[in-house]
Amino acid sequence: MSQVSDAAETAARAANAPLIQVRDASRSFQLGSEQVYAVRHVNLEIRRNRFVTLVGRSGSGKTTLLNLLAGLDHPTEGKVLFEDRDLADFSEGEMINLRRNRIGVVFQSFALLPLLSAYENVELPLRISGVGARERSRRTDEVLEMVGLTRRARHRPFELSGGEQQRISIARAVAIQPDIMLADEPTGELDSTNASNIFGLFREMSRERGMTVVATTHDRTLLDMADEIYEMSDGTLVQRSGPAQDPEALFKRPDEVDEG
Ligand SMILES: Nc1ncnc2c1ncn2[C@@H]1O[C@H](COP(=O)(O)OP(=O)(O)O)[C@@H](O)[C@H]1O
Ligand SMILES: [Mg+2]
């Protein structure tokens, strides 16, 4: 095999390697004399450029698992690897860098700053990351357009609807150009039309921006839009659907899949 195709194959493998791997991870809490497992013995691989949903009823462990993926919390047993490295081995500085540049987080409550305009809310993390003024304004304009809120840029959060506020919080997470966006019940406060628009946006981001998205939901009507669906129940994970069972398909471009 030539060096060129070797290199191409290595690159293809790297692109196809999981971004995050959860290996037999559990997270338990000591409540009095009782040990409560929020997540138990979960194995999961999050691949690049995919839109993954975690579905399950309230209390099934979705938030706890998402926090483990984000490195906001650590498993009490097992491990979580980011690009093959145990998150437990990351220094404080490396964790800060990871959250500023590689992992975007979106919460159900939006977590926007009320005194800042939509534009300023999106721009702030870029300032914190030291992105220069011109690039900051370019990216902020771009993501506001992506979420369809260019005309609302000067408005404060309280002047926006719930759906618009959530789109601002998504724009804020996307502006840092993370490898992965983790969204915890991002549609929890929204009506069904807005909820479906947000999931449509996630799908588009994974297809067109090469971003991985993991979103939790308890709304089963949204699941069709995801590439992979995992069901959580009592802290454990069961894959419901998705092409992960067919590793060959991961090497094909979407336009190759149906060709003979
Ligand atoms: N900090 C904590 N202390 C004790 N129990 C917790 C804590 N966080 C979560 N749990 C418990 O773990 C289970 C899963 O919670 P959670 O991950 O929030 O579920 P979900 O997001 O699916 O609603 C619940 O029974 C919850 O009460
Ligand atoms: Mg939750």
Image (cartoon, rainbow, N blue to C red):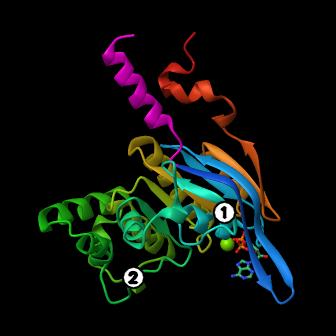
In terms of secondary structure, where does tag 1 sit? strand
Quadrant location of the C terminus in the rendered image? top right
Q: Nearer the viewer, residue 104 or 7?
A: 7
Compared to residue 257, the image places residue 189 above or below, namely below
Residue 155 sits in quarter = bottom left
Compared to residue 36, the image places residue 53 above or below, namely above
Looking at marks 2 and 1 on the same chain, the residue that comes earlier in the sequence is marked by 2
Q: Residues within 10 Å of mark 1 (few under 14, many from 20)?
A: many
Q: Position of residue 247 (x, y in %)?
A: 62, 29
Mark 2: which amino acid?
A: Pro
Residue 146 sits in quarter = bottom left
Q: Nearer the viewer, residue 80 or 115?
A: 80
Q: How many marks?
A: 2
User: What label does residue 157 carry, if any?
Assistant: 2
Q: Which residues are magenta?
A: 1-19
User: What label does residue 94 carry, if any?
Assistant: none
User: What label does residue 217 carry, if any?
Assistant: 1
Q: Nearer the viewer, residue 140 or 42?
A: 42
In terms of secondary structure, where does tag 2 sit? helix
The stretch drawn in magenta includes residue 93: no
Q: Is residue 163 left or right of residue 137?
A: right
* Distance from Cα at disc 2 to Cα at disc 1: 23 Å
The stretch drawn in magenta includes residue 10: yes
Q: Nearer the viewer, mark 2 or mark 1?
A: 1
Quadrant location of the N terminus in the rendered image? top left
